Amino acid sequence: MKFSTEKRFIAGVICPKCSALDKLVAYAQDDTNYRECVRCGFKDEIRISSPPNELKTRVNRSTNQKNNKVSAVKFVDFD
Ligand SMILES: [Zn+2]
């Protein structure tokens, strides 16, 4: 997850420093996510643990269906 470089308010988040509600903005800077309080200037790095990569098992089903064409051969004798 990566935040935009544009500062956006995080709704419902209380500043751990001044306990102000809805005063924290989140933004990305140099590939790092930050949260910053617009009231007291508290700034912290947001560490988001990336989920482990899911091992996607792709089953390649090769179509082994052989085209069994029954060729009918007619022997016609013209006497
Ligand atoms: Zn604050």
Image: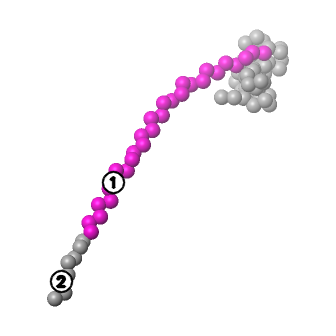
Quarter in which the C terminus is drawn: bottom left
> Can residue 29 be seen by looking at this rendering?
yes
Closer to us: 39 or 47: 47
Taking the view exactly as shown, the residue that stands out farthest to the left is 79
Side of 66 where 31 appears, left or right: right
CB under 8 Å between discs 2 and 1: no
Task: Determine which quarter of the picture holds residue 13.
Answer: top right
Magenta region, main secondary structure: loop
Q: Is residue 9 left or right of residue 66?
A: right
Residue 63, x across and y down, in percent: 37, 50
- Between marks 2 and 1, how big is the CA–CA gap? 36 Å
From the top left corner, tell me how far across and down residue 11 is, in percent: 72, 27
Q: Residue at x 48, y 34 (%)?
A: 56
Residue plotted at (23% across, 73% down): 73
Task: Find numbered disc 1 in the image and state the secondary structure of the residue it sits on.
Answer: loop
Q: Which mark is residue 77?
A: 2
Could you tell me which secondary element the residue under label 2 belongs to?
loop
Residue at (66, 28) in percent of width and height: 1
Magenta stretch: give its range.
Answer: 43-71
In the displayed orientation, state which residue is furthest to the bottom: 79
Amino acid type shown at disc 1: Gln
Question: Pointer 1: what residue?
Answer: 65
